[in-house]
Image (cartoon, rainbow, N blue to C red):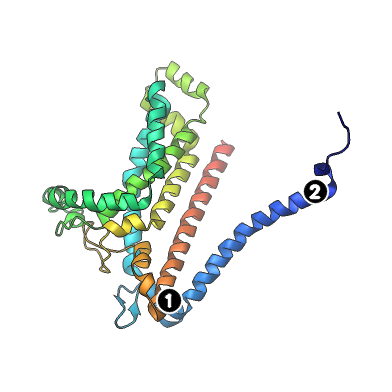
């Protein structure tokens, strides 16, 4: 067996490997900067024309070249919030069942089914929502909710209006189904890192499964749980095709959860192909706003996770 040094152990090869990997790492920052710069350049005409008033103007009038971001921003945030409120409890239940309650023979089929949901293209969710959910909501679910909840104080206004089928609530529900696999998979992974000794000790003291989950698993994994929720929120904020099918694409301020509206992504998808001049610049500014929103959401989630991790480390 030869004892000759390999060429891979040569200092030149080591230096080349180091600088190559460093280049790839810096390439990520370069791509982010390039995207941000291109969005700013593309939206410059709109930025100089409307200034900060673009953020609180609700008009979207291509005929008179008057544009504002309020409607798509509100539509994006509300639909994403609805999705998160629906998806988090369901994802939590799936993760707890897979890690604590499911028999071994059932864990793998359910895990595969969850992963298959994540692999379905978003346009399929959109078509399914349009041809299945929208008629179902229009004929049955929305009229029932309007009748039961429409007259209640405070929350009644959220469930008022005509049952169009399409709208914010339908978009939020479709988004919830789309992000459940991501949140559930990540929660399952973080629940799986809890030391078995902690859980077994709690069970040995007579704790129920719910007590173990609430007092042992969640405190131990809360940083990961928050991270999974923020991952799902980021996915919901940027979704385009599925939302475009079911949100209604109406540039009107919603007066209830059943009102047709628009999201940033759906507005860009619907209008960018035929947009010119100031309208195209306004759509680019919407893209810039979405970029900043997702950046802020992810940054806040990272800060929350860091703070939780530090608190756990100080205990």
Residue at 29 percent of width and 58 percent of height = 245
Where is residue 292 drawn, in percent x and y? 47, 63
State the residue lying farthest toward the front.
Answer: 1
The correct choice, above or below, for 24 with respect to 225 in the image is below
Q: In which quarter of the image is residue 164?
A: bottom left
SS class, disc 2: helix
- Front-most of residues 130 and 286: 130
Q: Is residue 18 above or below residue 286?
A: above
State which quarter of the image contains the C terminus.
Answer: top right
Which residue sits at x=37%, y=75%?
275
Quadrant of the frame with the N terminus: top right
Tell which of 72 and 53 is nearer to you. Answer: 72
Q: What element carries label 1?
A: helix
Task: Answer whether residue 95 is visible to the viewer in this image.
Answer: no
Closest to the observer: 106 or 123? 123
Asked if disc 2 and disc 1 are in contact, CB closer than 8 Å, the reply is no
Circle 2: is it few (<14), some (14-19), or many (20+) Cα within 10 Å?
Answer: few
Camera-side mark, 2 or 1: 2
Return the disc, 2 or 1, that comes first in the chain's sequence: 2
Q: Name the residue under label 1.
A: 281
Distance CA(mark 2)–CA(mark 1): 47 Å
| Label 1 crowd (10 A; few <14 / some 14-19 / many >=20) | many
Q: Which mark is residue 13?
A: 2
- Say left or right for 227 vs 166: right
> Looking at the image, which residue is at 45% across and 40% down?
225
Q: Which of 109 and 62 is in front in this view?
A: 109
Q: In this view, does 236 lie to the left or right of 132?
A: right
Measured as percent of width and height from the top left, residue 82 is found at 31, 51
Q: Position of residue 29 (x, y in %)?
A: 61, 60
The image shows residue 183, relative to residue 62, as above or below, that is above
């Amino acid at each position: 067996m030869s004892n000759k040094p390999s060429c891979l152990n040569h200092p030149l090869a080591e230096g080349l490997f180091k600088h190559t990997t460093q280049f790839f790492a810096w390439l990520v920052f370069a791509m982010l900067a390039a995207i941000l710069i291109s969005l700013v350049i593309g939206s410059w005409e709109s930025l100089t024309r409307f200034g900060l008033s673009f953020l609180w103007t609700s008009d979207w009038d291509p005929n008179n070249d008057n544009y504002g971001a309020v409607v798509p921003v509100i539509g994006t945030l509300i639909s994403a919030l609805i999705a998160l409120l629906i998806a988090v409890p369901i994802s939590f239940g799936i993760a707890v069942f897979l890690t604590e309650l499911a028999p071994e023979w059932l864990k793998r089929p359910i895990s595969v089914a969850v992963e298959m949901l994540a692999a379905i293209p978003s346009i399929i969710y959109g078509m399914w929502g349009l041809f299945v959910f929208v008629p179902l909501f229009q004929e049955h679910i929305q009229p029932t909710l309007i009748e039961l909840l429409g007259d209640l104080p405070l929350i009644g206004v959220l469930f008022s209006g005509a049952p169009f089928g399409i709208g914010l609530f339908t978009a939020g529900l479709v988004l919830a189904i789309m992000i459940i696999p991501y949140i559930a998979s990540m929660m399952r992974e973080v629940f799986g890192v809890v030391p078995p000794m902690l859980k077994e000790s709690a069970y040995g003291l007579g704790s129920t499964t719910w007590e173990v989950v609430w007092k042992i698993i969640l405190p131990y994994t809360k940083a990961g749980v928050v991270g999974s929720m923020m991952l799902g929120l980021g996915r919901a904020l940027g979704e385009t095709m599925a939302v475009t099918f079911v949100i209604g694409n109406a540039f009107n301020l919603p007066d209830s959860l059943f009102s047709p509206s628009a999201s940033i992504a759906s507005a860009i998808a619907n209008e960018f192909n035929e947009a010119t001049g100031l309208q195209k610049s306004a759509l680019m500014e919407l893209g810039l706003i979405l970029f900043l929103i997702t950046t802020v959401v992810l940054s806040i989630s990272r800060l929350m996770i860091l703070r939780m991790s530090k608190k756990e480390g100080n205990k």
